[in-house]
Image: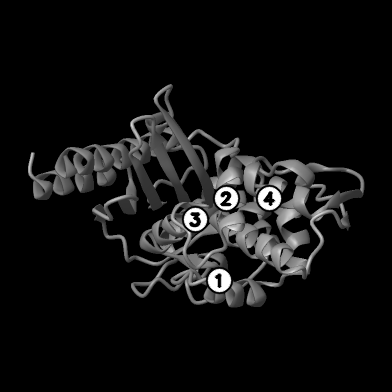
Amino acid sequence: MTTTALLSELRATLQDSGLHGSFLVRDLDTGEELGIDPEIEFPVASLVKVPLALATLERVRRGELDAAMPVEVAPGRLSVPGPTGMSRFRHPARVAVEDLVYLSTCISDSVAADALFVLTPPSRVTELLKDLGVKGISVRHTMNELTETPAERFEAADVHLAHALAIDAGTPGRGHRVPQLDISHANTGTARAFVDLLHSLWHPTTIPTEVAGAVRTLLSANVLRHRLAPDFASDAATWSSKTGTLLNLRHEAGVVEHTDGHRYAVAALTESSVAASSQPGADATMGQVARRLRDHLRVWAA
């Protein structure tokens, strides 16, 4: 199949699943890449926890933070479905900085992430990204804002109304009546920006080697593996990644490393036009599209 025919087919597959998506797959050793609209800017939801981890660990390396410093963290006390870790704690906890990075990155604990944002505010994270040569990712707010969307104002039976608002209230310029989905207000990035970040972590030049290695280790320990992992993880390959989910947004960015030595960075940023919070079919479609892009790139490169 030609590349043009494949991309046309994959766009149709996404459309049939109610998805609009931005994908990019890159061979980390040759730089060859293949994608679908990789420059579209999206609110990135929990993908922002990767640059947060990078910024925090860089500050530890510089001696600005002590990895073992205990931080008093108030309980999240959330009862809505979805949040994990300290977001569901009922009592205060004292957690070391380095362990907060683990909780934030590996189980997507937003309370842990916000404890890190107290130490390194969004504007400082953005500053550090620039220092480290990371471009195309804007960090503007903490994770707490992501727990104050219309979805939290409805009973469980009516959450589809929040998704309907997320789908219908956008503008052609990617503004939105829901601030967390407005690219001028939200934490944002593109598929290309996240592939570039992953490339910099797996082939560190501007990012210090020990910091890049620590972030890679965190991504390899990600426990949320329902989206792209089924199409990339196997006995012959490891999958290291971070997911991001908010209302009708479903994202994942990661690296697949094959035992034959080939390595590919993959970023999939999507929004759904289906007013439902649980869409396993959409997650499966994302994995299938990303996998077919990787497979085509692998054959093409050969």
Q: CA distance from mark 3 to mark 1?
A: 12 Å
Please identify the quarter of the rendering in which residue 279 is found. top left
- Crowding near the residue tagged with mark 4, few <14, some 14–19, many ≥20 C-alpha atoms within 10 Å: many
> Residue type at mark 2?
Gly
Looking at the rendered structure, the secondary structure element under dot 1 is: helix
- Crowding near the residue tagged with mark 1, few <14, some 14–19, many ≥20 C-alpha atoms within 10 Å: many
- Residue 289 image offset from top left, x and y in percent: 29, 40
In this picture, residue 263 sits left or right of residue 221: left
Q: Which residue is mark 2?
A: 213
Q: Which residue is mark 3?
A: 201
Compare marks 3 and 4 and give the one earlier in the sequence: 4
Does 219 sit above or below residue 20?
Answer: above
Residue 33 appears in the picture as rendered: yes
Q: Which residue is mark 1?
A: 129
- Crowding near the residue tagged with mark 2, few <14, some 14–19, many ≥20 C-alpha atoms within 10 Å: some
Q: CA distance from mark 2 to mark 4?
A: 17 Å
